[in-house]
Amino acid sequence: MDFALTDEQQLFADSVRRFATDKFKEGALKRAHSNEYPWEEAKMIANQGLLGITIKPEDGGMGGTLMDAVIAIEQMALICPKSADIIQAGNFGAIRTFAEYANNDQKKKWLGKLLSGEMVISLGMSEPEAGSAATDLRTSVKEDGDDYLINGQKVFGTHSRDASLFLVYCRFAPGLDGIGSIIVERDAPGFTVGEPSQFMSGEEWCPLYFENARVPKKNLLLGPGGFKQQIAAFNVERIGNTARSLAIGRHAYNLARDYAIERKQFGRSLCEFQGMQWKFADMAMKLESAQLLLYKAAVGADTGLPSAYDTTLAKLACNQVGFEVACEAVQIMGGMGYSRETLAEYCMLRTKGWMIAGGSVEMMKNRMAEFIFDRRFSQRPAK
């Protein structure tokens, strides 16, 4: 049993790290605090082959593994956390679902632009009354000739402010089997992207309004029953969230370690105080433990066995550890960590968000309980 990267993986990691250092280290702080989508950076990352890493070569991707994508996210996040978001968005979530289920005409029309960094796609899943209970969504679809008419509202979509495409979960009929998905273009008649709102990290999202939004039937991704297909692959999608959460926690850890070496109080460096040493020992232990769970989940998925248990446990561990370490880094760095003069506060706020997105840590604990007791625990009231 070998816990180290292979020679090929290490070479890839080193190449991404060099690329990130050369192109993204300068301006990383400014980039993190900007509300603008980094289009130029996205094109540079695309030209480096870091978008569509796991997508098939015949579809314009690199045909790599999930571990390759995880490594790319990690190495970029250690240099420029904001740019790691670009790699995640170009390999996981909506783009991966689209690449998996889109037909040839849909891929020909949009996938090339998504993989070149010219366009970004946003997921329309959460609604005001359907968050963790995603199957309670109300956004409805009805046929009208060669088109669909969509009515409803979506919230909290990543990149919704800047997206040209939206992968929208809709209800075609009652029940779980009545849910599917449609690709909606930003200029679709009856579709409105609302005014931006901010998460506490500064990232912006826009509510999406559908008022008899007219979308051609050729934009159908998966019809009724498609929700089950897409959710079945969600265990793999969580690896992207998990990788970012842990990598950005490690970025904060590195900032705090450097600060503890350089910062002097009471005539000596912070790292010479035993209390500080114990903090770093605890943080290192948590990071390394969570890293093993992440790699186990990613490697398992690459061998054709995407374990729901492994991905759930990895997300739970990495979400909690990423946030705990980032919070501790802010505490260690004091006023400087709490200010926007370093990336420590950004890392803390971002990692907090991933404890909610993609399945909250509470939902992950519920899921773990089902594995532990080998039974389903419904969160709905008994009928």
Image (cartoon, rainbow, N blue to C red):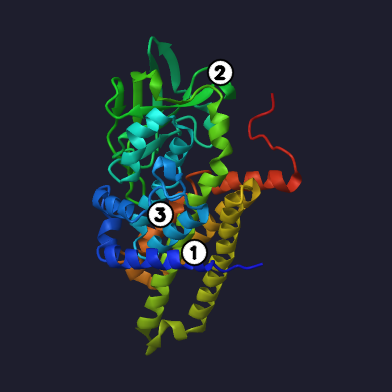
Numbered label attached to residue 377: none
Q: Which residue is mark 1?
A: 9
Q: Which residue is mark 3?
A: 350
Q: Residue at x 48, y 33 (%)?
A: 101
Real-space Cα separation, disc 2 to disc 3, in angstroms: 36 Å
Which quarter of the picture shows residue 84? bottom left
Q: Which circle, 1 or 2, is nearer the viewer?
A: 1
Quadrant into which the C terminus falls:
top right
Query: Residue at image x 28%, y 40%?
Result: 162
Mark 1 residue type: Gln
The residue labelled by disc 2 is 174
**How far is the residue under mark 1 from the one under mark 2?**
47 Å
**Front residue of this view, candidates 23 and 25:** 23
- Element under disc 1: helix
* Residue sitting farthest toward the bottom: 267
Q: Secondary structure at mark 3?
A: helix
Which comes sooner in the sequence, label 3 or label 1? 1
Q: Nearer the viewer, mark 3 or mark 1?
A: 1
Camera-side residue: 340 or 191?
A: 191
